[in-house]
């Protein structure tokens, strides 16, 4: 065999090997395997949950532990925060808003530099304001066209919108994600917005934990070897959201009893996990959160457990890797994550072209969570079939399938604001 034939053969074999290792992705409803969802109302000892007390006292803590151990990983216990208001402008956004910036860190822990929160308060209505709290992807300065927001300081991945040079955002990235935040609409409806760049908590890459909260909170720092049930990045970001809530409870401008936690995509997974654990979040909103968020893993439609663990090994805990290609063995499925939010109002939104996130699997998870809401006498979705595009449904569980792509739009925000108005009785 000539040498170049040998080279071709070696390349061919390598290709075949690589291809065979690539997780198979299914987008065909007809190929969704038969599956049985774990029963949220069945305790590990097989006892059936009979009422709300039994859910709250027995089953909810049990389920939370399973999600901690097998999916997201256990975070350390709550530590007290310290904070400093670093700027206030009573005339932001052409006089429409009050803008505040606050740095929040862990008291006595100087290994973590803390996180910067941007708050916009509406000028209409009276304080304290109901509030949307969410982590952002591209820095606080990306959420509005406001030249005075402090530009995010920490590592940032490059993005299509641009303005990130050498992993740091520049002036050119101001307002780059404004479309997804709809600040004017939020303020016009009388709500405050509080947001934090998720990279302040931990940068989003495999190994990023060394530069964030997880290393800072570990005795061994960057030498830590995580146990298979210890926190992954999603748990770290969710921990950050709870510490953000600790701050909001101390801010007299904020109605801490009316805080809705919201997130898109990986940050939707994070919002759900934060909302599942921390009952102070009065409403939980998941926008296109998909695999590891609102979508049922057992359907194996779009992104799978294996695909997500391979692309993002740092998001979930070590134990979750056991379930690559073995979704039926996960002791929980994502409808149970949604159920952990009961009886608080929950909103799940999907997008019609976002098949990777499995819109139908998100709807079915919301549907399967209803039985837990029923324990509390709360009506969930109120429909049995997935609604057509752009048709919001639901009472204590809201759902819509927006026409279009994987993103957050004004249509999505309109529904979240309507939902919040209803539940906050405004
Ligand atoms: C994708 C990932 C999804 C989703 C998304 C995002 O690449 O596979 O699970 O989280 O990123 O966060 O935008």
Image: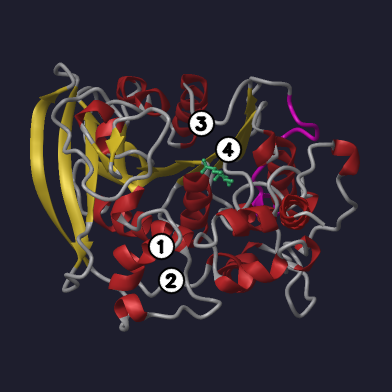
Location of residue 175 with respect to 108 vertically, above or below? above
Q: Which mark is residue 75?
A: 2
Find residue 260 and report its horizontal and vertical position in percent: 42, 42
Between disc 1 and disc 3, the foreground one is 1
Distance from the alpha carbon under mark 2 to that under mark 3: 31 Å
State yes or no: Cβ of the residue under disc 3 lies below 8 Å from any atom of ligand 1: no
Q: Secondary structure at mark 1?
A: helix
Location of residue 139 with respect to 14 vertically, above or below? above
Between disc 2 and disc 3, the foreground one is 2
Q: Which mark is residue 288?
A: 4
Tell which circle, 4 or 3, labels the residue nearer the N-terminal end.
4
Location of residue 321 with respect to 223 vertically, above or below? above
- Quadrant of the rendering where the C terminus is positioned: top left
Find residue 103 and report its horizontal and vertical position in percent: 17, 52
The stretch of residues the image draws in magenta is 372-387
Query: Residue 245, located in which quarter of the rendered image?
Result: bottom left
Q: Residue furthest bottom?
A: 219
Distance from the alpha carbon under mark 4 to that under mark 3: 17 Å
Q: Which mark is residue 419?
A: 3
Tell which circle, 1 or 3, labels the residue nearer the N-terminal end.
1
Q: Which residue is mark 1?
A: 236
């Amino acid at each position: 065999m000539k040498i170049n034939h040998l080279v071709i053969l070696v390349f061919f074999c390598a290709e075949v090997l690589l291809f065979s290792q690539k997780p198979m992705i299914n987008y065909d409803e007809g190929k969704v395997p038969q599956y049985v969802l774990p029963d949220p109302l069945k305790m590990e000892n097989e006892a059936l949950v009979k009422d709300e007390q039994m859910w709250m006292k027995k089953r909810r803590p049990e389920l939370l532990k399973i999600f901690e151990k097998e999916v997201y990983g256990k975070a350390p216990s709550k530590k007290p925060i310290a904070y400093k208001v670093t700027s206030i402008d009573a005339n932001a956004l052409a006089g429409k808003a009050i803008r505040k910036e606050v740095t929040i860190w862990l008291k006595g822990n100087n290994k973590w530099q803390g996180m910067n929160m941007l708050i916009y308060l509406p000028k209409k209505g009276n304080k304290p304001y109901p509030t949307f709290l969410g982590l952002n992807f591209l820095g606080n300065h990306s959420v509005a066209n406001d030249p005075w927001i402090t530009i995010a300081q920490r590592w940032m991945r490059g993005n299509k919108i641009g303005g990130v040079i050498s992993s740091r955002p520049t002036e050119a990235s101001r307002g780059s994600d404004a479309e997804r935040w709809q600040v004017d609409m939020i303020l016009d409806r009388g709500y405050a917005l509080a947001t934090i760049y998720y990279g302040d908590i931990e940068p989003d890459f495999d190994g990023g934990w060394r530069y964030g909260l997880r290393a800072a909170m570990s005795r061994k720092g960057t030498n830590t070897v995580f146990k298979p049930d210890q926190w992954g990045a999603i748990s770290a970001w969710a921990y950050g959201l709870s510490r953000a809530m600790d701050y909001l409870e101390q801010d007299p401008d904020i109605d801490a009893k009316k805080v809705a936690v919201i997130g898109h995509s990986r940050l939707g997974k994070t919002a759900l996990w934060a909302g599942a654990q921390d009952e102070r979040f009065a409403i939980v909103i998941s926008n296109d959160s998909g695999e590891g968020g609102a979508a049922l893993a057992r359907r194996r439609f779009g992104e799978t457990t294996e695909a997500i663990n391979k692309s993002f090994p740092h998001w979930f805990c070590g134990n979750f890797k056991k379930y690559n290609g073995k979704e039926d063995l996960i002791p929980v499925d994502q409808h149970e994550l949604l159920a952990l939010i009961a009886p608080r109002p929950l909103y799940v939104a999907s997008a019609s072209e976002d098949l990777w996130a499995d819109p139908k699997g998100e709807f079915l998870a919301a549907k399967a969570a209803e039985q837990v809401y029923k324990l509390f006498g709360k009506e969930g979705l109120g429909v049995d079939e997935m609604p057509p595009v752009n048709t919001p449904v639901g009472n204590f569980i809201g759902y819509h399938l927006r026409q279009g792509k994987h993103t957050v739009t004004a249509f999505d925000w309109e529904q979240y604001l309507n939902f919040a108005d209803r539940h906050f009785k405004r």
